[in-house]
Image (cartoon, rainbow, N blue to C red):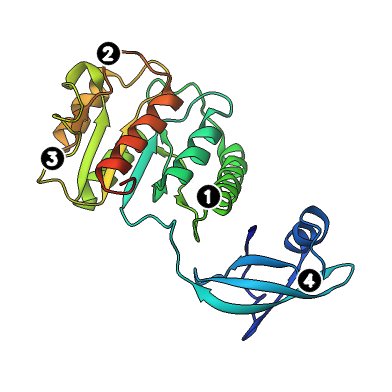
């Protein structure tokens, strides 16, 4: 059954009244008629079955049924800090890591980051990233997308991770040991939130890794093969989601 995130101000006691892109999606994309049913994710995060009762040119009204128990929302607090990368590679990272269950994605401007958007470009990208996360959350069954934060400098990202009080990791294969069933990424002493920094094309500089280690972040690796930046971000997220019990 198709899902729709309902905007603020569109919910009555047991009725939603939708207009704009949401009404267009139900009426013209899904082609729902009166009696058609979809899943409505309300602004408070609850999910309810909704039955279309009325359509006109600009609006769709639907009656709300009982609240459903969310099954796909992540329980673990995993926060990804991927470097800004060229083109739209970060779009893919945001989409796939939303599906995996990452709680927050905050891009980082690193020494080797080729992508360096100006303030206007950053605002446009942030809007696009949040839309991608929302669409991915709708597709995968989450009732809320991950938090998508504006890009920040490497030093600020490291300071934020250090201030969180959870586990801080930096993907630095040259300074990390192997991983596997007998050597997991997380240790028994690690606590949530779990934050992981992933470098750009060419990886982090030695100075960046040193400053991260001095701030308490632990280097981790993904084996001997060299991965693209976007592949590494998705791979480390999947492994951490698994170790946090989200894929069991």
Residue plotted at (77% across, 73% down): 35
Could you tell which of marks 2 and 1 lies nearer the N-terminus?
1
**Secondary structure category for the residue under label 1:** helix
Mark 2 or 1: in front is 1
The residue pinned by badge 3 equals 187
Label 2 with label 1: CB-CB less than 8 Å = no
* Residue marked by disc 4: 60
Tag 4, which secondary structure?
strand
| Residue under label 1 | 140
**In-front residue for pair 153/223:** 223
Which mark is drawn over residue 78?
none
In-front residue for pair 197/135: 135
> Upstream in the sequence, badge 4 or badge 3?
4
- Crowding at dot 3, Cα within 10 Å, few <14 / some 14-19 / many 20+, comes out as few
Marks 2/3: CA–CA distance: 21 Å
Residue 197 percent across, percent down from the top left: 32, 34
The answer for how far apart the CA atoms under marks 1 and 3 are is: 29 Å
């Amino acid at each position: 059954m198709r899902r729709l995130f309902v905007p603020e101000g569109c919910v009555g006691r047991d009725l939603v009244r939708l207009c704009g892109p949401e009404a267009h999606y139900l009426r013209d994309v899904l082609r729902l008629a009166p009696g058609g049913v979809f899943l409505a994710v309300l602004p408070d995060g609850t999910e309810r079955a909704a039955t279309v009762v009325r359509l006109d040119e600009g609006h769709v009204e639907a009656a709300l049924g009982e609240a459903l128990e969310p099954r796909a929302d992540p329980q673990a607090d995993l926060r990804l800090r991927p470097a800004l990368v060229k083109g739209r590679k970060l779009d893919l990272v945001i989409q796939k890591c939303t599906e995996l269950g990452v709680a927050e994605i905050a891009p980082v401007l690193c020494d080797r980051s080729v992508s360096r958007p100006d303030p206007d470009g950053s605002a446009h990208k942030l809007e696009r990233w949040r839309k991608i996360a929302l669409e991915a959350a709708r597709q995968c069954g989450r009732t809320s997308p991950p938090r998508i934060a504006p890009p920040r400098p490497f030093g600020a990202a490291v300071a934020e991770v250090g201030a969180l009080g959870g586990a801080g990791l930096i993907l630095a294969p040259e300074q990390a040991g192997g991983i596997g069933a007998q050597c997991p990424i997380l240790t028994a002493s690690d606590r949530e939130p779990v934050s992981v920094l992933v470098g750009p094309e060419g990886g982090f500089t030695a100075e960046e890794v040193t400053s991260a280690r001095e701030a308490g972040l632990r280097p981790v690796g993904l084996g001997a093969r060299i991965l693209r930046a976007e592949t590494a971000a998705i791979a480390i997220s999947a492994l951490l989601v698994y170790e946090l019990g989200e894929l069991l």
